[in-house]
Amino acid sequence: MTTSLLGSLAEIVGPAHCLGGTDRAPFVVDGRTPCGVVLPSSADEVARVVTTAAAAGVPVIPWGGGTQMSRGTPPPDGALVVALRRLNRVVEYEPGDLTATVEAGMTIEALQATLGTRGQWFPLDPPMPEAATLGGVLASNAAGPRRHGYGTARDLVIGLRVVAADGQLVRAGGKVVKNVAGYDLVKLYIGSHGTLGILVDVTLKLRPRPEAEGACWATFTSLAAAAAAAAALAGSELGPVVLTLLDERAAATGARGSALPAAGGPALLAAFDGLGRTVAWQGDEAARRLRAAGARTVDWLEPAGVARALEVVREPRRLVANPVALATASVLPRQVGPYIEAAHATARAAGFEAAAIAHAGHGIVTLLLTPGETPRPAVVTAGVLAEWRAAARAHEGHLVVEWAPLGVREVCPVWDPPGAGLALMKGLKARLDPQGVLNPGRFVGGI
Amino acid sequence: MSSHPGPDRARLRAALQAIAGLDGVLTEPDELLVYESDGLTIFRATADAVVFPRSAEEVAACVRLANAEGLPFVARGAGTGLAGGCLPSEGGLVIALTRMARILEVDYANQVAVVEPGLVNLHLSQALAPQGFYYAPDPSSQFACTIGGNVANNSGGPHTLKYGVTTNHVLGLEVVLPDGEIVWLGGKVRDPQGYDLVGLFVGSEGTFGIVTKVVVRIVRRPSAVRTLLAVFDRLDQASGAVTAITARGLTPAALEMIDQITIQAVEDAFGAGYPRDAAAALLIELDGLDTGLDEEAEHVSDACRESGAREVRRARTDAERQLLWKGRKQAFGAYGRVAPAYMVMDGVIPRTRLPEVLRSIERIATAHALRIGNVFHAGDGNLHPNILYDPRKPGEEQRVLAAGAEIMHACVELGGSISGEHGIGLEKRDFMPWIFSDADLATMAAVKAVFNPTGRCNPGKMFPTKKSCAPGEIAYQPHPLEASGLIQRL
């Protein structure tokens, strides 16, 4: 980075919040080192930083908690990291409205703590809430087990503001839960991986904390039986808010984490929340149906146990000790069982082991690849990922490589080959970031 | 009013008939009358032709023809919209989707269905009912409005308080882009990679292209329901109850408010069982598993009584429930007993500001010597003040439009929005700068240019009108307030 750019940035954010040298180490991704890291304290500072970097021809990498930075093609070398963690204030919170506006650098955990003091919460549970920020979660459209009952970010966010590539502040949506004025740009920015704008604040739909929570932890002797039981619950009137299927390895971790007896097979976590009386009924009825569906054991978890179990299933990366790669496939819900079984077979045939965890009602399957008896070269790892992708695509699905060594991603791309919408997506990028300032080259289709 | 030189009508008719069949085209003036307005009859515009394609390929051919002829074009479902969104305000072609009304596929196991855009919303739920499923977004016009229209407007309805609006139930779209290309966005499988083009398309009010297939989520019907009617002697008690219910951590499936003017009209029209002397009533629905619903209903009733409800009734039979809902869903039609015409407004405020905005609406009504009936989704702050008037009385229409604009302004000042459900369309395009900055509007215009670079697809909607006209942009149309001399553009 040139001295003059460094100097300009230091003038904007203050020299203490402009990092160089070894301080950049935590922000290195795939061996690509940023030219510097700035930590602005306001939307206005973010805007000025972006304008300054753009004028110098330096691309910008927005950075929240850094929990999803592996998700994408490697970033350009020598870009400027704009870290948002100092934008962590509550802007507006009226509990009677069940809405809140918070700055994008606030972590999920800090948000929930604030809302909890008023008996409310934001029902999105992405991985690593202690580090993940609202901005990063929305930009990567991260979600967790409660997506089954509550939806994902696009169902829960009613407004946001971004700093656009030209430094302008742009508002999408508003502050009210029903709003169809203008185009729904909230949907555009969510999941855009920082390529169209840097999120600076978000307005969220909140829920009252439920009176009661409980979950069935059911173990099975076969994946097929577990998947069938999940499908039955998903299609029933019982209305679980979590419906997560774990294969044998994932279930073993889940059981340990929840202080439950070792599963010895696949497991299903079905959680319920609401009025105490209703949750008790749901638990009894679910347990009955799960046993009738062939569950070997069914344990009922009270709120503390539910929290522990959800902490485990929310963190796919920690399900196994030594993952070689991690990918998430989207398939039709009824395909989940057969898809996981095929994925295991593919992994074994290539000399690996695999573990799988799925949000069964939505068809979201996270697969982890772990070493077999002998280490395999990157190209073989890539081959497994490519086969997993082909298997998803065979049934209208797709797969994203969430994490894998660079050598693997050079052979098996992170993103699926782009589909029919690519021209529109490229058109949007060209209009909203013509100079390619924001996170260039990391996204679908080379965007 | 068409601002383009009229195409050779006979030639256009022949070209359209070659696409949609001899009985698929209307060009005679008396035939075109029906298509001059949607549900907001204060605005009218005449098309050059209306065509009824039967497939995505025929829609694409109509679009290509329109482009070749330099004609603007706009899609139309049932024409129940309330913002003038499907008006051919620049003349040109209306592409009516009513012949594309099939359910193509229902996959109960994976809880999705694929339907054509002209399918009536309620017909979809009725088709799914035998299996215990339904399509959740339930606009009050659902007995007539179409899924395609719902997609264009991101339609809501009373039960969207709990279940979300159209965009929360659409997974994929086949669309004809304004250049005539047919493209699939999204699909049956969740979390498509790349930008959320489906989410962007929903609510784009027909300006990004024409939907030809919709992949929707279908869900199990709730197993049980409790429907309550809370009766209040004062309007502010009713709005206080809305906050009280929320404060108790309760999430009703629907929470609707009806005021006295509306109650009396509804009772005259249907005898729905609403008490005529009430200042306001809340229609509250709870649904889900039967266990616990009585307890929830008790909590809701307590909240209403604590707010001053003089009575809280529970519908005892399904017939009683249907009647209460009929009163709510057909309230607009009942106004015909009170006045020859009404203008439906649509605004949103944060629900805690409900008492204030209702007082403002009363003030505005008095100031303009108009009667306003309120029947709306109190639970999510989505207002529908209905301005009752007689279009034959000189000056009345102008007062209606002026009052409407003031109500919208009041919503904005309270932190709300200018449309909760009905869309911007023609009606509110000039109010957009009240809630969006130049940068916001420029971003939307940039997005529109990606889909609709010529501007020929549904021109004149959503965005503020301009005085100057560049090639490909819409010609200037004075806002009715301006045309009537009430306001002046500076």
Image (tube, coloured by chain):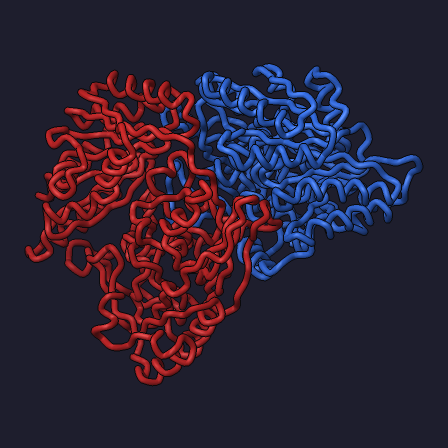
Q: Colour of chain B?
A: red
| Closer to us: B490 or B7 | B7
Name the residue located 24 percent from the left edge and 57 percent from the top edge: B489
Residue A167 position, x and y percent, is: 53, 46
Residue B5 position, x and y percent, is: 30, 79
The picture quadrant where one finds residue B255 is: top left
**Disc count in the image?**
0
Name the residue located 38 percent from the left edge and 35 percent from the top edge: B161
Chain letter corresponding to the colour blue: A
Residue B416 placement, left or right of A295? left
Q: Is residue A8 visible?
A: no
Farthest-out residue, right: A374
Residue B202 position, x and y percent, is: 45, 51
Q: Is residue B203 visible?
A: yes
Residue A307 placement, left or right of A407? left
> Taking A411 as reference, is A101 above or below it?
above
| Closer to us: A137 or B119 | B119
Residue A267 position, x and y percent, is: 69, 28
The picture quadrant where one finds residue A222 is: top right
> Taking B302 as reference, is A37 above or below it?
below
Query: Which quarter of the rendered picture does the N terminus of chain A lie within?
Result: top right
